[in-house]
Image: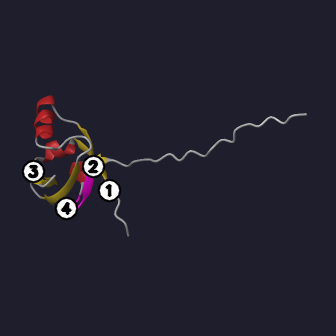
Amino acid sequence: MLESTKPTPTPTHQVVMATCPLANCAPGSQATVVGLGCSPDEGCRLRALGLYEGSQVCVVEARHCMLVDVRGTRLALGNDLTAGITVQLERRSA
């Protein structure tokens, strides 16, 4: 009698990526942009300045507005705008 061989299920590892608004990031934070929740005109302007989905940003300062470094260029963004930009924080190795 032949034994049937069933493929053994391989465990799947689901990675949950935590995201937050850019406005919640502290100075010194590095993150990857995952979404721009703003008007089409603002989105077009941000993309032209290098701030698009997948781009890396570093928060330089966060006072009255947020100063971010994007590919060597510093951009000052208002609080309403940074609240609509969704980012994924980079994990720092210990």
Please rate how many residues cluster around mark 4, counting C-alpha atoms within 10 Å: few if below 14, some from 14 to 19, many from 20: some
Find residue 27 and name its label: 4
Q: Does residue 21 lie above or below 43 as drawn?
A: below
Q: Which mark is residue 7?
A: none
Q: CA distance from mark 3 to mark 2?
A: 15 Å
Q: Position of residue 70 (x, y in %)?
A: 16, 51
Identity of the amino acid at label 2?
A: Thr
Residue to which mark 2 is pinned: 32
Q: Is residue 76 left or right of residue 38?
A: left
SS assignment at label 3: strand
Label 2 to label 4: alpha-carbon separation: 15 Å
Q: CA distance from mark 3 to mark 4?
A: 14 Å
* Marks 1/3: CA–CA distance: 20 Å
The disc, 2 or 4, on the residue closer to the chain's N-terminal end is 4
Q: Tell me which numbered mark, 1 or 2, is placed earlier along the sequence.
A: 2
Q: Main secondary structure of the magenta part?
A: loop
Are the residues at dot 2 and dot 4 in contact (C-beta closer than 8 Å)? no
Q: Real-space Cα distance between discs 4 and 1?
A: 13 Å
Please state the extent of the stretch shown in magenta in the rendering.
26-31
Q: Which of disc 4 and disc 3 is earlier in sequence?
A: 4
Cβ atoms at labels 4 and 1 below 8 Å apart: no
Q: Is residue 77 magenta?
A: no
- Asked which secondary structure carries label 2, the reply is strand
- Specify few, some or many for label 1: CA neighbours under 10 Å numbering under 14, 14-19, or 20 or more: few
Mark 1 / mark 3, whichever is N-terminal: 3
Q: Mark 3 — residue?
A: 75
What's the residue at 25%, 57% (across, down)? 30
| C-beta proximity under 8 Å, tags 3 and 2 | no
What residue type is disc 1 on? Glu
